[in-house]
Image: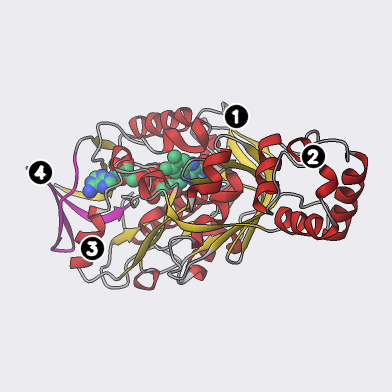
Amino acid sequence: MINDLIVIGGGAAGLCAAVYFKKNNPTSTVRILEALPRVGKKLSLTGNGRCNITNKEINLSRFHGENVEFAQYALEKYDRFFTEDFFGGIGVNFVFEGNKGYPASLQATSVVDCLRFATDELGIITHLETPVTNIQIYENGYKIISNKISFITKNLIIATGLLSGGERMGSDGKMLEILRKADFKVIKLTPAIVQIKTETDIVKQLKGIKLNANVTLGENTDFGEVLFTDYGLSGPPVLQVSRGAARVQAPQKITLDIMPQTNFNELLSILTARAENLKKRNLDEFFTGMLQKRVGQVLLKLIGCRLNENVATLNSQKLKSLVSLMKNWSFNVTGTTGFANSQVTAGGLDTNCFNPTTMESKSNKGLYCIGEILDIDGDCGGFNLQWAWSSAFCAGDHIGKTNDNN
Ligand SMILES: Cc1cc2nc3c(=O)[nH]c(=O)nc-3n(C[C@H](O)[C@H](O)[C@H](O)COP(=O)(O)OP(=O)(O)OC[C@H]3O[C@@H](n4cnc5c(N)ncnc54)[C@H](O)[C@@H]3O)c2cc1C
């Protein structure tokens, strides 16, 4: 039997593409082949279990890739309103917290459930524990091979994701090897939206402490709550700026401005007045009431103070050094916590091999790649799922238009 569409990968993009295509082409035969015992495993864990499903500010500046313009058509045509309509139609209503969109249930599992219910209602056949191990070009289509079963299809969507989340989420990247052998070019993979490892002498002393800061790594800056850990730095702004950490070879630094609302001179005046007011205290209590106590003590030690000395020893030179450190506290980056801990993989299939208005391969008619497997990744905040949805709609629409499936 020749299928109209086979989708490899029952994750965010694959489920969305199958449901969208089958809704518009109800008499077609559609199968999803999923390696794991259930679909949508990673999707069910997104957004700390709440699924940050989209963002109000979807624009190209929040996406990355060697040829990021590739994503523009799909993101604009199948935007967040289109996405909201589609999900409304399968039972998922959206709510927004600031710019970030979530399912109104605030449960990522409910998004998977609604996609799963829709596949059943539409008559999409899902094959679980069916890892695809090979793809062969067949007369006017493709032969898809998994263990002892094989399928023939006119159209093939590959939505197997990449390495983020690790193998427990079905992310082993093996599909990339199959496609590489079929002459698809691959852009180097690196983890993105990931914790940063630094030299540990200072961060270990502050393990568990959170503070608000402007965080800068390379060209990227973001504000929010930073968490010190025994391996380095974590927290939303660290994840947001992490993309460059694994790419650059040269030694690099991640820098915190822990007083972003106050400029150098203002902060110097504040600390000078504080030193005058608190001159009867010892330095170990100088920052008590202004900063997290342990952070204050570490800062003072870093500029060479002894904590059992009196506050009066803070001369103007030391106060300036303290302000410089608070505005520009640098840590040497030693790496990231790797693919398994990352939310998205930068790199992937070279988008030059695909048509941006359809997601179809330029060399293999009827073969489409969508979602994370392509060399497009987004910032933290719902951008990666929006890419999964937009690219899925784009492929689904094109297959519907070019095939007589109705
Ligand atoms: C912990 C975590 C939290 C995240 N939170 C958010 C968030 O809140 N908002 C956001 O926008 N993004 C988030 N992301 C990123 C987002 O989940 C991904 O960008 C998105 O899931 C990618 O969709 P995809 O369909 O391309 O891949 P996936 O969702 O990874 O799906 C790929 C599917 O293919 C299957 N598969 C793989 N190989 C084969 C094979 N050979 N044969 C058959 N099946 C195969 C896998 O088992 C998997 O089910 C998060 C990621 C992680 C890891």
Magenta region includes residue 139: yes
Q: Secondary structure at mark 4?
A: loop
The amino acid sitting under disc 1 is Ala
Q: Tell me, for residue 286, which label it has, or none.
A: 2
Magenta extent: 130-158
Residue at horizontal 52%, vertical 49%? 386
Q: Secondary structure at mark 1?
A: loop
- The image shows residue 42 at horizontal and vertical percentages of 39, 38
- The image shows residue 353 at horizontal and vertical percentages of 34, 71
State the CA–CA distance, disc 2 to disc 3. 61 Å
Marks 3 & 1, CB-CB < 8 Å contact: no
The amino acid sitting under disc 4 is Asn
Rendered view: 398 above or below 56: below
Residue at horizontal 26%, vertical 56%? 155
Left or right: residue 149 compared with residue 371 = left
Residue located farthest toward the left when viewing the structure as drawn: 148
Q: Earlier in the sequence, mark 4 or mark 3?
A: 4
Marks 2 & 3, CB-CB < 8 Å contact: no
- Among the 4 quarters of the image, the one containing residue 395: bottom left
| Front: mark 2 or 4 | 2
State the CA–CA distance, disc 3 to disc 1. 38 Å
Where is mark 1, residue-wise? 104
Magenta span dominant secondary structure:
strand
Residue at horizontal 71%, vertical 36%? 292
Left or right: residue 204 compared with residue 316 = left
State the CA–CA distance, disc 4 to disc 3. 18 Å
Q: Earlier in the sequence, mark 3 or mark 1?
A: 1
Where is mark 4, residue-wise? 147
State the CA–CA distance, disc 2 to disc 4. 67 Å
The amino acid sitting under disc 2 is Phe
| Front: mark 2 or 3 | 2
